[in-house]
């Protein structure tokens, strides 16, 4: 029988989301499904049906992403992409991805984005790794500051269900300084902060702590504590789900709080930016147990709209120009030669017949888009080619940002 790709029927939405359990080999809790319902646009969730049985799932959240210059761009946040093991290698994922990318294009969303379970899969569709993640797993006695900074302000624990009005300004302040952040509104925050029903009991309780100084909140952290005991006493593990601060002092004091939690032996954190200041705060960074991983993957859907949405560096005279040849097999409307003209950080992008400075694929442009991956770096791996002398350097001066892009939230 032919597998049909269609919008999920309203009365089968929960069933479709739960079907992702098969591919991910995990049980999705009821509260997660309810949170997905709150933030989802049902008409953007698809299912693959074989004789009315769901054998594949996918969806797109309507989102906005921060880009260089402190701006947002409309973005389709691709999620829950799965195909049952019984239906692999039949082109089902390709059909769903085709439908989702075309939908983004029709809606005027210049980019699509996702977190990849397997990056090799999504590069086939033109996604490039635009952010990386730093993870740490360290014994708390490894945290010793490089300097004897005085303790300032205070940290306060908040009851589950409270605190959004306090932490949202911090998140927004950090979001304005880094590309890669999702827009969070009243629908998205409940999935980040502790829930009064779920997180008031159990073995791993989520907690929210805010750091206050000079009458305002400068930082916060959401974390879980797993209590464990052995014959030598307490050996709790603290897992940091999010730690954010709008000032250097806030960063320092939030992490001081986390490293000094009583009864804790191990501190874990995921999805930190690769240039996080924790590396310069601690005296022994190698003891942090740092590992690296991929973060947000970006797919350019509309080259002109996407590139004109962000700002750029310049050559020191307030202007800059780059011509490039783009290959894009999956979205052929993007393929061709473009000229990017920058004046005062603002860009005009148009097609051109001029000789290109560099040539690249859609995967590479997606990787470069948020300013964390350079053309010269990609060229060392044979991915970007310099077709005119100085092209790689010109591209990097325009695209790279002072701070690495960071996406602190999976979706």
Image: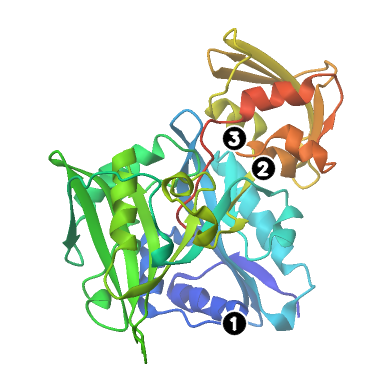
Of the two numbered discs 1 and 3 on the same chain, state the one appearing first in sequence. Answer: 1
- Front-most of residues 345 and 288: 288
Check the image and report above or below for 39 versus 341.
Answer: below
Identified at 39% across, 35% down, the residue is 176
Secondary element at tag 1: helix
In three-dimensional space, the C-alpha distance between marks 1 and 2, rounded to whole angstroms, equals 30 Å
In three-dimensional space, the C-alpha distance between marks 2 and 3, rounded to whole angstroms, equals 8 Å
- Front-most of residues 360 and 156: 156
Check the image and report above or below for 7 versus 133.
Answer: below
Q: Is residue 308 left or right of residue 207?
A: right
Q: Which residue extends farthest bottom?
A: 231
Marker disc for residue 371 = 3
Q: Quadrant of the N terminus?
A: bottom right
Would you say residue 134 is visible in this rendering?
yes
Q: Is residue 213 left or right of residue 356?
A: left
x%, y% of residue 358?
A: 80, 27
Q: Residues within 10 Å of mark 3 (few under 14, many from 20)?
A: many
x%, y% of residue 251?
A: 34, 46
x%, y% of residue 49?
A: 64, 76
Q: Which residue extends farthest top?
A: 317
Secondary element at tag 2: helix
Q: Residues within 10 Å of mark 2 (few under 14, many from 20)?
A: many
Q: Quadrant of residue 118?
A: bottom right
Identified at 37% across, 92% down, the residue is 231
Q: Which residue is mark 2?
A: 367
Q: Which residue is mark 1?
A: 22
Identified at 16% across, 66% down, the residue is 159
């Amino acid at each position: 029988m032919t597998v049909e790709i269609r919008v999920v029927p309203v009365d089968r939405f929960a069933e479709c989301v739960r079907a992702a359990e098969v591919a991910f080999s995990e049980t999705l809790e009821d509260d997660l499904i309810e949170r997905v319902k709150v933030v989802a646009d049902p008409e953007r969730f698809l299912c693959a049906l074989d004789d009315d049985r769901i054998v594949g799932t996918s969806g797109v959240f309507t989102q906005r992403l921060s880009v260089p210059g402190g701006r947002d761009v409309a973005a389709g946040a691709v999620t829950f992409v799965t195909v049952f093991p019984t239906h692999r290698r039949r082109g089902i994922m390709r059909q769903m991805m085709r439908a989702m990318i075309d939908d983004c294009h029709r809606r005027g969303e210049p980019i699509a984005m996702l977190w990849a379970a397997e990056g090799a899969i999504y590069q086939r569709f033109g996604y490039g790794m635009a952010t990386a993640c730093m993870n740490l797993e360290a014994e708390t006695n490894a945290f010793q500051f490089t300097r004897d900074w005085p303790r300032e302000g205070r940290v306060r624990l908040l009851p589950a269900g409270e605190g959004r009005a306090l932490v949202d300004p911090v998140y927004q302040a950090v979001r304005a300084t880094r590309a890669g952040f999702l827009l969070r509104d009243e629908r998205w925050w409940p999935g980040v902060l502790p829930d009064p029903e779920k997180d008031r009991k159990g073995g791993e309780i989520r907690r929210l702590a805010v750091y206050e100084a000079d009458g305002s909140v400068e930082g916060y952290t959401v974390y879980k504590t797993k209590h464990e005991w052995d014959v030598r006493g307490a050996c709790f593990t603290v897992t940091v789900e999010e730690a954010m601060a709008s000032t250097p002092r806030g960063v320092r004091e939030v992490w001081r709080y986390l490293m000094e939690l009583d009864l804790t032996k191990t501190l874990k954190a995921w999805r930190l930016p690769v240039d996080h200041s924790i590396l310069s705060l601690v005296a022994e960074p190698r003891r942090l147990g740092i590992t690296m991983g991929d973060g947000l993957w970006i797919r350019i859907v509309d080259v002109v709209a996407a590139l004109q949405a962000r700002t750029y560096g310049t050559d020191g005279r307030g202007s800059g120009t780059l011509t490039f040849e783009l290959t894009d097999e999956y979205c052929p409307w993007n393929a061709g030669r473009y000229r990017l003209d920058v004046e005062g950080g603002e860009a005009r992008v148009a097609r051109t017949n001029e000789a290109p400075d560099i040539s690249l694929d859609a995967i590479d442009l997606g990787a470069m888009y948020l300013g964390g991956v350079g053309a010269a770096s990609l060229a060392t791996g044979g991915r970007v080619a310099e077709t005119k002398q100085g092209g790689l350097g010109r591209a990097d001066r325009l695209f790279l940002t002072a701070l690495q892009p960071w996406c602190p939230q999976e979706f």
